[in-house]
Amino acid sequence: MSLDLNIQTASIVIAAVSVVGSAVYFMLETRHQHRIRQTENIIALSPWFNMDAKDIQEAIANVRSLEYSNYEDYVKKYTGKPEQTSLKLLGNYFEGVGLLVYMKLVEIDIVSNFWGDVAESIWDKNVELINGMRKDIGTPYTFQYWEWLVKEFKRKRNSS
């Protein structure tokens, strides 16, 4: 009788562990699917993620060619020109990338390896312009996730 009871108890324990394991797997899979949907939604809402390599390279070249003494000089020289559009395109692109990293949908190391130097150098060179835009249009959070991303790159580099 004791052997039958031990086999029966073992069967119940195995069944219970299977149910708990299945529930944990389901919860993890549901969380994973939610993260995929979030990522897809951000990408769908951000048309800048649909730029091709040529568009991005052209935007980078345009922004790197900017020459200005201050925000007012930039506005006078570049309003309505491709260089201004390029800065906004890259800003929106890196804003989306920064949001994905901020929401932990993409790992910062991946972004840093692909875009770290570009995102950081363009930000650093043009932070005065971005602050001028923020003030001009009354939106203090313009490109806030791009700014956050660059700060994270620097923090990570300094802590290594």
Image (spheres, helix red, strand yellow):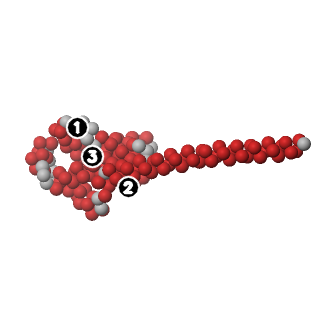
The answer to the question of whether label 2 and label 3 lie on touching residues, with beta carbons closer than 8 A, is no
* x, y percent for residue 114: 37, 55
Which quarter of the image is occupied by the N terminus? top right
* x, y percent for residue 88: 22, 49
**Of tags 2 and 1, which is closer to the observer?**
1
Label 1, on which residue?
139
The answer to the question of whether label 1 and label 3 lie on touching residues, with beta carbons closer than 8 A, is no
Label 2, on which residue?
114
- Residue with the most extreme right position: 1
Residue type at tag 3: Trp
**Of tags 1 and 3, which is closer to the observer?**
1
Between the C-alphas of marks 2 and 1, the distance is: 29 Å
Residue at position x 32%, y 50% from top? 45
Q: Which mark is residue 79?
A: none
Question: Disc 2 or 3, which lies upstream in sequence?
Answer: 2
* x, y percent for residue 59: 23, 57
Q: Secondary structure at mark 2?
A: helix
Label 3, on which residue?
123
Q: Nearer the viewer, residue 5 or 101?
A: 5
